[in-house]
């Protein structure tokens, strides 16, 4: 049971950090400069919101397969085939949780408007300086929401994990899969502990996020 | 010398302006909303890119090949809404300007804070300030970036009257103590009268006229003389103070005027005479309550509507021009024409 918890936290933490690195420039690019065709990319990023996780998992399984072009390329980079490994799970989680990071960031960048950037430029701050000293602090509620949702969503994913990760202890057996396992094998007590723990975790996350988010707003 | 030319399509109208101004004093960009005033300012700051040319003294900021991005231009920009950074305190906002402006600050931090009266606000957050306080901090922040050109886009228009009256004296002090050219966008003639050294009149993206306020306000073909509150504005010099009646005598070119207040000798005095407060008489009315009676001649005139007529007078000894607004009936009754000598009776003079 503890292995599954530790593995889940590890997966969610790595995924969230990767998403901060990937999602920030991506969300910024979607907002500035504004172009109608960028909506196409925004829609692709948002697909996991509507697609059944099994569908996503199925395509990911195909894409990561070492027998095909892209999967073969990844296999070469990582030195081993990716399906049914922790690395493969991280890649899947990043794609699956991408909209949960990009959407709040995009909203935060959009609400900010052009004005703070113009002000910073007239005060002679370079674009890079402006991004770190104005954009990031002003969008902090977006960063908070995005990180919390990405983390929580990764913790809760099941369909994708089952499709590309399977059920290997210490490698791909995360919480949600473990609960499923316990129920299947009629180990109700363990299932109760994990499920109840998740319920509590979800509640605390939502409560704390909304409390902090209120304090983070600038009116 | 500042030399600027901008030309291009902006939404539904074409901007096409070309002007030269001295590298000092306040230049007001004046016109109704949507005439292109703000666009000119944004072009000067590099926030907007139109075809054109911009030279500040010896530095070219824009020509056919060069276009300096905003953050490479030493401008200070005060926006209509103060736009303070909400995540920084007042002090940090000010430091943001100072940090990026470098060390060669024109005036130091303490001087700016004193000049703008913001020492008590330093630790506060922008959300806890009034509109007027925000705008003062925004002005301070712009100045601390050591600009060589200060651009102000209707800095008072988002404020209520009290806040406006609170800021104007600070702007006047800036004007007197700093040697930075200021471009000031406004659609409010009273701000122009109080602050501007020269005026660029804009209409539909084009410059209608450029000149000093006094000359333009006496031009009958321009909208200033046609406004309800048309007035002439003069610079005046202190002559004497009469203790008994609490009146100050000032000198303008071509005459003297009594003002009903005590004015200190050192200040530059700017006065305004509303066109409708000037009445005309063929003979000097000695038995009159009017203190200020100035000999003048009719220089030009233009009917304003069916009942009123605008008359431009020239004060004696080739003095300054004075705008008067009288009825057409009086004009005919006095049998006035260009060159007629008469007396301008000034009912009230305002110190601005």
Image (tube, coloured by chain):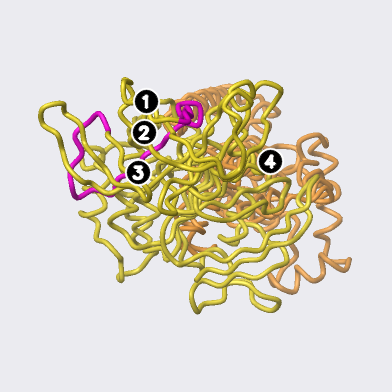
Chain colours: A orange, B yellow
**Do the residues at pointers 1 and 4 share their chain?**
yes
Helix, strand or loop at label 1? It is loop
Residue under label 4: B34
| Of the pair A157 and A51, the residue shown nearer to us | A51
Q: Is residue A18 magenta?
A: no
**Do the residues at pointers 3 and 1 share their chain?**
yes
Helix, strand or loop at label 3? It is strand
Q: Nearer the viewer, mark 3 or mark 1?
A: 1
Check contact, mark 3 vs mark 4: CB within 8 A: no
| Residue B92 image position (x, y, % from top left) | 32, 49
Q: Which residues are magenta?
A: B259-282
Q: Is residue A154 visible?
A: no
How packed mark 3 is, by other alpha carbons closer than 10 Å (few <14, some 14-19, many 20 or more), is some
Q: Chain of mark 4?
A: B
Cα gap from disc 3 to disc 2, whole angstroms? 19 Å
Q: Nearer the viewer, mark 2 or mark 4?
A: 2
Please report whichever mark, 3 or 4, sits nearer to the chain's N-terminal start: 4
Q: Nearer the viewer, mark 2 or mark 1?
A: 1
Residue under label 3: B270
Cα gap from disc 3 to disc 1, whole angstroms? 27 Å
Q: Residue at x 17, y 42 (%)?
A: B240
Q: Chain of mark 1?
A: B
Check contact, mark 2 vs mark 4: CB within 8 A: no
Helix, strand or loop at label 4? It is loop
User: Which of the 4 quarters of the picture holds residue A155?
Assistant: top right
Check contact, mark 2 vs mark 1: CB within 8 A: yes
Q: Chain of mark 3?
A: B
Q: Nearer the viewer, mark 3 or mark 4?
A: 3
Residue under label 1: B285
Please report whichever mark, 2 or 1, sits nearer to the chain's N-terminal start: 1
């Amino acid at each position: 049971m503890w292995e599954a918890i530790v593995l889940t936290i590890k997966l969610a933490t790595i995924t969230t950090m990767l998403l901060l690195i990937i999602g920030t420039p991506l969300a910024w690019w979607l907002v500035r400069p504004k172009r109608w065709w960028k909506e196409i990319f925004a829609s692709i990023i948002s697909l996991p919101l509507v697609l059944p996780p099994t569908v996503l998992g199925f395509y990911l399984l195909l894409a990561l397969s070492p027998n095909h072009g892209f999967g073969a390329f990844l296999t070469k980079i990582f030195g081993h085939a990716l399906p049914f490994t922790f690395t493969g799970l991280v890649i899947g989680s990043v794609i699956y949780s991408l909209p949960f990071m990009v959407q709040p960031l995009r909203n935060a960048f959009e609400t900010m408007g052009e004005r703070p950037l113009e002000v910073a430029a007239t005060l002679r701050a370079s674009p890079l300086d402006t991004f770190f000293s104005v954009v990031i602090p002003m969008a902090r509620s977006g960063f908070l929401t995005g990180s919390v949702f990405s983390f929580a969503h990764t913790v809760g994913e099941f369909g994708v994990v089952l499709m590309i990760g399977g059920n290997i202890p210490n490698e791909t057996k995360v919480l949600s899969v473990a609960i499923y396992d316990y129920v299947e094998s009629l180990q109700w007590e363990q299932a109760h502990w994990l499920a109840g723990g998740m319920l509590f975790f979800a509640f605390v996350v939502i409560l704390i996020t909304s409390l902090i988010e209120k304090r983070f707003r600038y009116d | 010398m500042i030399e600027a030319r901008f030309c291009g399509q902006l939404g539904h109208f074409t901007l096409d302006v070309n002007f030269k101004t001295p590298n000092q004093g306040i230049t007001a960009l004046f016109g109704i909303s949507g005439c292109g005033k703000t666009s000119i300012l944004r072009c000067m700051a590099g926030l907007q890119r139109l075809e054109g040319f911009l030279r500040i003294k010896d530095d070219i900021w824009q020509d056919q090949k060069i276009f300096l991005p905003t953050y490479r231009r030493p401008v200070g920009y005060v926006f209509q809404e103060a736009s303070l950074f909400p995540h920084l305190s007042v002090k940090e906002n000010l430091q943001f300007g100072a940090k990026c402006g470098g060390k060669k600050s024109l005036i130091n931090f303490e001087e700016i804070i004193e000049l703008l009266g913001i020492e008590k606000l330093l630790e506060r957050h922008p959300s806890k300030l009034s509109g007027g306080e925000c705008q003062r901090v925004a002005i301070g922040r712009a100045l601390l970036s050591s600009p060589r050109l200060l651009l102000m886009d209707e800095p008072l228009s988002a404020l209520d009257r009290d806040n406006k009256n609170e800021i104007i004296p600070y702007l006047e002090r800036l004007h007197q103590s700093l040697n930075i050219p200021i471009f000031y966008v406004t659609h409010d003639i009273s701000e122009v009268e109080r602050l501007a050294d020269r005026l660029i009149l804009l209409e539909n993206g084009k410059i209608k006229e450029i000149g000093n306020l006094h000359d333009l306000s006496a031009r009958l073909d321009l909208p200033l003389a046609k406004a309800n509150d048309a007035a002439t504005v003069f610079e005046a010099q202190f002559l004497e103070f009469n203790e008994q009646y609490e009146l100050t005598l000032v000198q303008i070119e071509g005459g003297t005027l009594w003002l009903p207040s005590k004015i200190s000798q050192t200040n530059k005095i700017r006065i305004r005479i509303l066109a409708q407060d000037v009445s005309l008489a063929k003979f000097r009315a000695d038995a009159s309550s009017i203190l200020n009676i100035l000999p003048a001649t009719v220089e030009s005139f233009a009917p304003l509507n069916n009942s009123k007529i605008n008359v431009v007078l020239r004060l004696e000894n080739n003095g300054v021009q004075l705008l008067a607004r009288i009825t057409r009936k009086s004009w005919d009754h006095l049998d006035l024409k260009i060159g007629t000598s008469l007396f301008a009776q000034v009912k009230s003079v305002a110190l601005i």
